Image: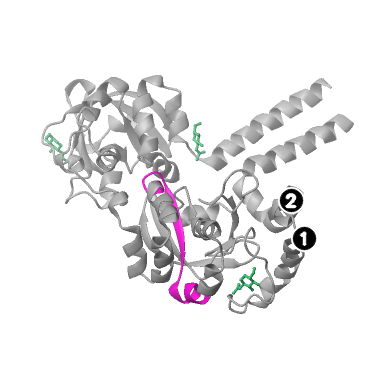
Amino acid sequence: MKQVVVTTTFLLSLILFLSSIANGHNITRILAQHPDFSTFNHYLTTTHLAGEINRRKTITILAIDNAAMSSILSKHLSIYTLKNVLSLHVLVDYFGAKKLHQISKGTTLVSSMFQATGAAVGTSGYVNITNLKGGKVGFAAEDNDELNSFYVKSIKEIPYDISVLQISHVLTSADAEAPTSGPSQVDLISTMAKQGCKAFSDLLRASKSALSTFQENIDSGLTVFCPTDNVVDGFVTRYKNLTDTQKVSLLLYHGIPVYQSLQMLKSNNGIMNTLATEGSNKKYDFTVQNDGEDVMLETKVVTATIVGTLIDQDPFVIYKINKVLLPRELFKAAPSAPAESPKPSKKKKKKVVDDDEADSPDAADAPEADVEDQTADDVNGAIGKNNGVGLVTLLVTLFMGLLVL
Ligand SMILES: *[C@@H]1O[C@H](CO)[C@@H](O)[C@H](O)[C@H]1NC(C)=O
Ligand SMILES: *[C@@H]1O[C@H](CO)[C@@H](O)[C@H](O)[C@H]1NC(C)=O
Ligand SMILES: *[C@@H]1O[C@H](CO)[C@@H](O)[C@H](O)[C@H]1NC(C)=O
């Protein structure tokens, strides 16, 4: 029995180790262990920089403690300007404490994420790192002559993935602090109308309630899927047949309240809640599936494919899709349904199965039916999405096996 426990403990550690590699770094979690950096950490999250940082490899975060953050917060910058300032503190190269002291010729310019966004004028998104007398290391934004911040200590180093170093002061940069317009000033309706989604934007404009829900989410994270004009035109008669509440639900079904880059959609197969999702019985969710480079959205009534990107400004993105998303809560996958153009035979087969489900009166509310369906449909997606679950299952299986022995 002792051996079993030892083996299990070993397996558990191995599995935790493997899943930590699989999930990459998480800046929020790293900084959460250092309460002195809670303000900096908080703003990395609210500016959505944390997500960007977690997606990148080979980066260095120049972290500012709570006391030093007050100087920048007292300037009352908008969240978008603050994002520029903080992105200047994310260097797109790896600098451990050791490398910092070994810079050739004692001084270098390193590109930051501010430079990478394209928002920086000229080279103002570069950070000057200079070795000074007595082992002191100074930092400054390139558009600032004076080295105004100094290396304090190393907080976390995972060579050559992520390094988190504390510096004494916020890097001051007139360019990064210049007022900037955020995505909320983007006109949702006209952005869609100008790029082949006019019909959908007209439906949205006519629904005050749906439009305001979309707009309220732009700042905090919003992904919109707008069906192209020709498919919306063919759908309008069915749309007019819906009650006002159903119209709102259908429109909200085309938005999800989080930012999802194309890369994230490609790597995160699985169920997505939408703006129309409310509690457990109004699910209005759909499944994201990949087919090679294609990202498909499956509602069980229809499968749409992303065919383009209208705008991508984290935390806000609009994709163009080739079908109206028909939620199973509102539409049956009836073969006689006229609005959809003929489907490839690949999808036909699945549709027959869905028809049976949709015909039963409480298909939409029956969770068991759904779970079953998901396992069949999304086995790949589930494993792809959540390595943890797969590994835990493996562990449990191994453990049971060992107990039997
Ligand atoms: C990172 O860690 C935070 C805090 O532990 C957690 O809320 C968040 O979901 C994590 N993000 C990712 C992408 O795992
Ligand atoms: C960095 O700044 C210092 C001080 O202003 C300057 O002497 C040095 O030349 C700069 N380094 C680079 C690579 O521009
Ligand atoms: C409109 O709704 C009625 C009643 O539910 C239905 O019989 C009819 O087929 C619908 N028309 C369209 C175009 O969907």
**Residue 187 vertical placement versus 280 (above, below):** below
User: Is 341 on the left-hand or right-hand side of 163?
Assistant: right
Q: In the rendered structure, which segment of residues is drawn in magenta?
A: 217-234
Write down which quadrant ligand 2 falls in.
top left
User: Is 183 on the left-hand or right-hand side of 298?
Assistant: left
View extreme (right): residue:
404
Residue 225 falls within the magenta-colored stretch: yes
Label 1 sits on residue: 360
How many angstroms separate mark 1 from mark 2 (CA)? 10 Å
Dot 2 amino acid type: Ala
Q: Position of residue 89 (x, y in %)?
A: 29, 36
Label 2 sits on residue: 366
**Residue 1 vertical placement versus 323 (above, below):** above
Give me the residue at 50% from left, 72% from top.
Answer: 236
Task: For label 1, count other residues whose C-alpha is less than 10 Å away and answer few (under 14), some (14-19) or many (20+).
Answer: few
Dot 1 amino acid type: Ser
The image quadrant that residue 42 belongs to is top left
Q: Does the CB distance between marks 1 and 2 fall below 8 Å? A: yes
Q: Position of residue 320 (x, y in %)?
A: 44, 66
Q: Is residue 95 visible in this depiction of the protein?
A: no
The image quadrant that residue 311 belongs to is bottom left
Q: Is residue 351 visible in this depiction of the protein?
A: yes
Mark sitting earlier along the chain (1/2): 1
Where does the N terminus fall, quadrant-wise? Answer: top right
Task: For label 2, count other residues whose C-alpha is less than 10 Å away and answer few (under 14), some (14-19) or many (20+).
Answer: few
